[in-house]
């Protein structure tokens, strides 16, 4: 264990050295100029203190204080709580063992008569195990009482640590550094009380802007803490915090070691004066808010944006007892105006601290509630309480439709919070992620949260996570930059071990495990080659370049085809052009006989976009089931949306249905409706890529929604596919759409055939990729491109 200071014999030999050391010890502000110090404390006897925290601290040469209680399920639950033998080993390692009462009893007016026995019990247990009598105490639950400091002194404690309250609200884990001479040693504030939502920035905040001569004392609970998730710290974050301390040159101490730095008999005249001074110095108002469903009155999990007049963003914290809050801060590096700064919050009250000023609040929840925009004025630091209603304009689950996002890059621990706040039913986190050619996904350079099994993770009965999914997103070949593109393996059962390209055998393995293959974006260099060689299942009609924030990707990786109807080219392509480029590429592939089903993915976690901003809705006949949902996605009983809801049937059937027809033509009555919380522009029926019927908006306002009825009879000549799509504008003028999966009309001996222009476009895309990659990729990968080219040429040869 690294000592607090070098030994006197090493550095301060002789009387002058001793005099200088004694003088220095009573001048903490001078010591602080030369050395950064922090105290680590750990509460509640958690098993992870021994299994996770101990090896990290020992490896870095850090000290700490561990506060011991036999409260909660200490006696019976050794999965979550230490044994006394482990506690004794911490003492042998050189860590300090502190007292936290027998039953985690708070110090209050009701317990003052009993807490002494509680404390003595832990002292006795320490003695039984050869542990010195504790000189440090932590107030259980961070509850403090005016009698506390003097009582702790009477009981022989040198130090007693509290939380960050009452200077700061408990929920955020903020606090103040210990100021010797101002803070009573038995009323030590925590500078930070770690929370599961903390990032490295939150940790740094606890160490920054400190008064001269002060020492931050940090409070942790379990790493992780399954019994008390609201104060849990993820092991990877804890390790990041500790490495930050090491990199910044902090001397990391236990409370016991403070005795050699601070005169513990130097007590303030009034132990509570500094607390009141800090409270008076704060300028922020404590703002407490609740969002409820306007119809049911039930609290809602929501996504919240708070922006000040100067553009500063603020991030609220959940006050729910088992609640959580997840901050999201993403900005596109090429187009910095494209940014997404929000917090997703569990249902219930939440809070934020705001200095005086005017703030724009935006509150959203998935796709089925009308966003709420409010201006909040903070005039002074008086507390403010807000209570708002969100209006649901449609309830899709009541109609049998359940949503999913098939391109997710958020950490697994965040997903329960996010899925409830966005009301997203199914998520596919791409936990295996490889960006180098030939590299097996098991060794992927972007891997995260690799699941031990493919078992479904249930947030609740209608919100689930399939954890085993893989992304091949190739940006380099043999260590040199060479972008190929991306494809996803969704819902497989075992890790896929093969690197690529070639990709056909990977596809066979994935399909054998019941997985679906998702093409990602249509403009990737290799995309048009993958469709035939991998037998790709899904096409992202709403992909990860369509965001809530401003559109950023105006430079595309592939040209539009001459026959495509939209006006912009890749050099000046806007959001609407990008959307139509995807539609018309999809139509081209359908016309060539590739039965791709539409899906939606956001890449939330990488891009500045909320989870589920674009989503795929799948219809189920009965109660929600992941297996039935995945089957419906595969069948194409679905539609994709980033705004409106498309509810329609063709000849009484949902999308994805296949009509077998013995005649050359077939009448197809269409009936349904488009709904949105904004006026609609139009809806269209598309047959074989051509718009054959248009219903003009805006529709009629019915309750909280605009409704555009659609009813007509269409004729399909020969084998065909039919789809519906609709469009509307947000108040900011942004286009939002919904697009159904196709219905198919199958006529025997009359297969669907593309136009010459369509198949020649696909051929040109593969030829261009062959020319670009022939001298770079392995021969097997080049052979796959040539196979794709031959498939397309064979289709071309069948065109009359």
Image (cartoon, rainbow, N blue to C red):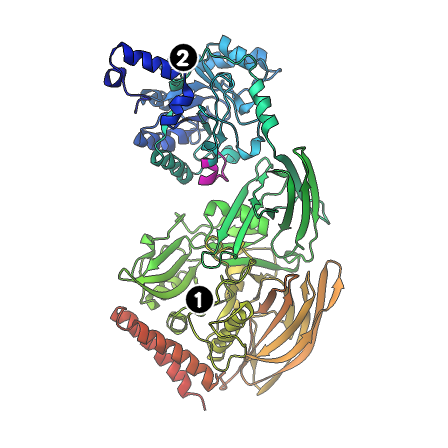
In the rendered image, residue 745, in percent from the top left (x then y), is placed at 56, 79
Asked whether residue 142 is in view, the answer is yes
Q: Is mark 2 on a helix, strand or loop?
A: loop
Q: With 254 as the anchor, is 330 left or right in this view? A: right
**Looking at this view, is 121 or 284 the one in front?**
284
**Residue 156 on image: x %, y %:** 46, 10
Q: Name the residue under label 2.
A: 133
- Residue situated furthest bottom in the rendering: 800
Per the rendering, the mark at residue 624 is none
Q: Residue at x 64, y 47 (%)?
A: 361
Q: Above or below — where is 324 with respect to 485? A: above
Position of residue 359 relative to residue 570, above or below, is above
Q: Is residue 643 above or below residue 162?
A: below
Q: Are marks 1 and 2 in contact (CB under 8 Å)?
A: no
Expressed as whole percent of the image width and height from the top left, the position of residue 667 reads: 64, 82
Q: How many numbered tags mark residues here?
A: 2
Q: What element carries label 1?
A: loop
Q: Within 10 angstroms of label 1, few (less than 14), some, or many (20 or more) residues? A: many
Residue nearer the viewer, 501 or 193: 193
Q: Where is residue 227 in the image (x, y as percent from the top left)?
A: 50, 32
Depth check: 42 or 504 in front? 42
**Cα gap from disc 1 to disc 2, whole angstroms:** 64 Å
Quarter of image, res 275: top right
Residue at 28% x, 68% y is 777
Can residue 260 be seen? no
> Which contiguous range is marked in magenta?
194-204
Crowding around mark 2 (Cα neighbors within 10 Å: few <14, some 14 to 19, many 20+) is some
Above/below status of 514 relative to 3: below
In the image, taking residue 369 as reference, residue 417 lies left or right, namely left
Who comes first in sequence, dot 1 or dot 2?
A: 2
Assess whether residue 135 is covered by the magenta stretch.
no
Q: Mark 1 points at which residue?
A: 519
């Amino acid at each position: 264990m690294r000592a607090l200071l070098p030994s006197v014999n090493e550095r301060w030999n002789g009387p002058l050295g001793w005099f200088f050391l004694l003088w220095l010890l009573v001048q903490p502000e001078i010591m602080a100029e030369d050395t950064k110090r922090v105290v680590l404390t750990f509460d509640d006897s958690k098993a992870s203190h021994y299994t996770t925290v101990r090896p990290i601290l020992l490896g870095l040469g850090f000290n700490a204080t561990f506060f011991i209680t036999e409260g909660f399920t200490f006696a019976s639950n050794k999965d979550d709580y230490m044994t006394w033998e482990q506690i004794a080993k911490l003492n042998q390692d050189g860590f300090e063992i502190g007292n936290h009462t027998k039953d985690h009893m708070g110090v209050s007016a009701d317990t003052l008569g009993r807490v002494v026995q509680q404390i003595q019990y832990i002292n006795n247990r320490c003695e039984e195990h050869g542990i010195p009598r504790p000189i440090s105490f932590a107030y259980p639950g961070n509850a403090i009482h005016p009698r506390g400091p003097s009582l702790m002194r009477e009981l022989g404690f040198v130090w007693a640590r509290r939380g960050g309250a009452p200077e700061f609200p408990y929920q955020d884990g903020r606090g103040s550094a210990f100021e010797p001479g101002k803070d009573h040693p038995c009323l030590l504030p925590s500078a930070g009380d770690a929370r599961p939502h903390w990032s490295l920035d939150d940790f740094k905040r606890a160490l920054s802007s400190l008064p001269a001569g002060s020492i931050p004392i940090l409070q942790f609970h379990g790493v992780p803490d399954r019994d008390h998730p609201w104060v849990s710290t993820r092991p990877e974050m804890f390790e990041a915090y500790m490495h930050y301390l090491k990199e910044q040159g902090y001397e990391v101490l236990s409370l016991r070691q403070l005795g050699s730095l601070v005169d513990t008999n130097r007590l303030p005249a009034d132990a509570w004066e500094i607390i009141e001074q800090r409270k008076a110095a704060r300028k922020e108002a404590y703002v407490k808010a609740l969002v409820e469903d306007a119809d049911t009155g039930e609290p809602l999990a929501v996504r919240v944006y708070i922006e000040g007049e100067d553009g500063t963003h603020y991030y609220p914290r959940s006050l729910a007892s088992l609640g959580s809050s997840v901050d999201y801060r993403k900005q596109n590096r090429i187009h910095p105006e494209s940014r997404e700064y929000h917090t997703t919050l569990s249902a219930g009250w939440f809070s934020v601290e705001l200095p005086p000023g005017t703030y724009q609040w935006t509150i959203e929840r998935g796709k089925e509630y009308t966003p709420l925009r409010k201006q909040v004025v903070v005039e002074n630091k008086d507390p403010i309480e807000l209570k708002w209603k969100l209006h649901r304009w449609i309830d899709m689950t009541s109609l049998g439709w359940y949503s999913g996002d098939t391109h997710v890059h958020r950490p697994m621990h965040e997903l329960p919070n996010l899925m409830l706040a966005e009301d997203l039913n199914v998520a596919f986190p791409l936990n295996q992620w490889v960006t180098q050619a030939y590299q097996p996904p098991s060794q992927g350079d972007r891997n995260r949260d690799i699941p031990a099994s493919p078992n479904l993770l249930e947030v609740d009965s209608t919100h689930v996570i399939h954890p085993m999914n893989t992304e091949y997103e190739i940006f380099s070949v043999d260590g040199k930059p060479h972008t190929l593109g991306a494809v996803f393996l969704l819902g497989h059962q075992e890790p896929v071990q093969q690197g690529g390209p070639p990709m056909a055998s990977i596809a066979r393995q994935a399909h054998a495990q019941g997985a679906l293959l998702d093409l990602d974006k249509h403009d990737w260099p290799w995309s048009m080659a993958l469709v035939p060689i991998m037998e790709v299942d899904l096409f992202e009609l709403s992909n990860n370049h369509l965001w809530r924030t401003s559109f950023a990707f105006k430079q595309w990786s592939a040209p539009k085809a001459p026959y495509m109807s939209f006006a912009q080219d890749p050099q000046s392509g806007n959001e609407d052009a990008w959307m139509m480029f995807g539609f018309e590429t999809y139509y081209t592939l359908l016309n060539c006989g590739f039965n791709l089903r539409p899906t939606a993915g956001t890449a939330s976690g990488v891009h500045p976009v909320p989870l589920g901003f674009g989503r795929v809705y799948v219809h189920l006949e009965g109660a929600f089931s992941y297996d039935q949902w995945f089957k419906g996605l595969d069948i194409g009983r679905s539609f994709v949306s980033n705004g409106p809801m498309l509810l329609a049937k063709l000849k009484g059937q949902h999308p994805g249905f296949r009509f077998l027809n013995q005649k050359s033509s077939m009448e197809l009555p269409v009936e349904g409706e488009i709904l949105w919380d904004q006026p609609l522009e139009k809806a269209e029926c598309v047959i074989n890529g051509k718009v054959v019927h248009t219903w003009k908006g805006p529709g009629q306002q019915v309750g909280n929604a605009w409704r555009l009825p659609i009813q007509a009879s269409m004729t399909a000549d020969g084998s065909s596919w039919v789809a519906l799509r609709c469009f509307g504008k947000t108040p900011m003028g942004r286009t939002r759409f919904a697009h159904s999966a196709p219905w198919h009309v199958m006529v025997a001996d009359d297969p669907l055939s593309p136009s010459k222009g369509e198949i020649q476009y696909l051929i040109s895309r593969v030829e261009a990729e062959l020319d670009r990659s022939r001298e770079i990729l392995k021969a097997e990968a080049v052979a796959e491109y040539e196979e794709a080219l031959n498939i397309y040429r064979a289709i071309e040869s069948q065109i009359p």
